[in-house]
Image: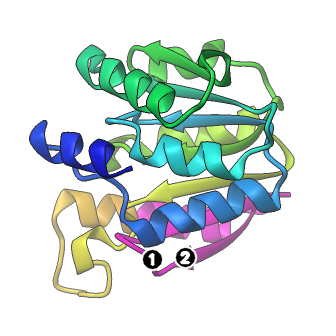
Amino acid sequence: MRTARSLAHEVGLDAVTPGAGAALRLLAAAGNARAVVEIGTGTGVSGLWLLRGMRADGVLTTIDVEVEHQRIARRIFSEAGFAAGRTRIITGRALDVLPRLADGAYDLVFVDAEATGFHACVEAALRLLRPGGVLALNGMLAGGRIGDPAARDAETVTVRETIKAVRESEHWIPALLPVGNGVLAAVKC
């Protein structure tokens, strides 16, 4: 985990915090997750947390556009003792890859991507998750700006709209977890 965090810093990525990682592990374990989709592989920090919470026969499908980040993550997963068959690493834009994944086949979808893609990722998660599956979105406190009514930048507005859409949807039972940069967790009805 330390190596993955250090490498994330070296390549300029913000890895999930230990608190957010612990929440991801908990969500994966509580749902007895066997099939998980991660949008935003990074250097493998969040993937390690998810794998640690998943069933021993579970498979993490992780998507990222950066080949170099995925190469690092593959090494990190191996060094942490996870067999190559426990991860399916797909290079590409999430919105191009997600339509190719099976409907209702996943227990958890974790999104750690740019806020501009949140709405599309929520829509994709609704299709990908089984009933009772969990959606988790990282960065939902928008760097502390979410509670500031004067904050009107594009990221903060997008995050607010995403939270509102999930909260008002009949398809989700949500909770905003104040861990790390904020994790919006929602169970599919």
Give the residue at x 24% y 18%: 68
Q: Which mark is residue 148?
A: none
| Marks 1 and 2, how far apart at CA | 9 Å
Along the line of sight, the residue nearer the viewer: 159 or 137: 137
- Residue 142 image point, x, y percent: 28, 69
Q: For numbered disc 2, what is the local secondary structure? A: strand
- Residue 179 image point, x, y percent: 45, 76
Residue interval drawn in magenta:
161-189
Q: Which mark is residue 179?
A: 1
Q: For numbered disc 1, what is the local secondary structure? A: loop
Task: Give the quarter of the image for residue 91.
Answer: top left
Give the residue at x 37% y 57%: 16
Q: Would you say 40 lies left or right of 82 here?
A: left
Amino acid beneath label 2: Leu
Q: Which residue is mark 2?
A: 176
Answer above or below: position of 97 versus 154: above
Q: Are marks 1 and 2 in contact (CB under 8 Å)?
A: no
Amino acid beneath label 1: Val
Residue 169 part of the magenta segment: yes
Along the line of sight, the residue nearer the viewer: 188 or 42: 42
Give the residue at x 61% y 40%: 123
* Residue 171 visible (yes or no): no
Pick the quarter of the image with the C terminus: bottom right
Along the line of sight, the residue nearer the viewer: 78 or 164: 78
Q: Label 1: how many residues lie within 10 Å, few (<14), some (14-19) or many (20+)? A: many
Report the colour scheme: rainbow
- Residue 161 image point, x, y percent: 43, 63
Q: Would you say 153 lies left or right of 128 here?
A: left
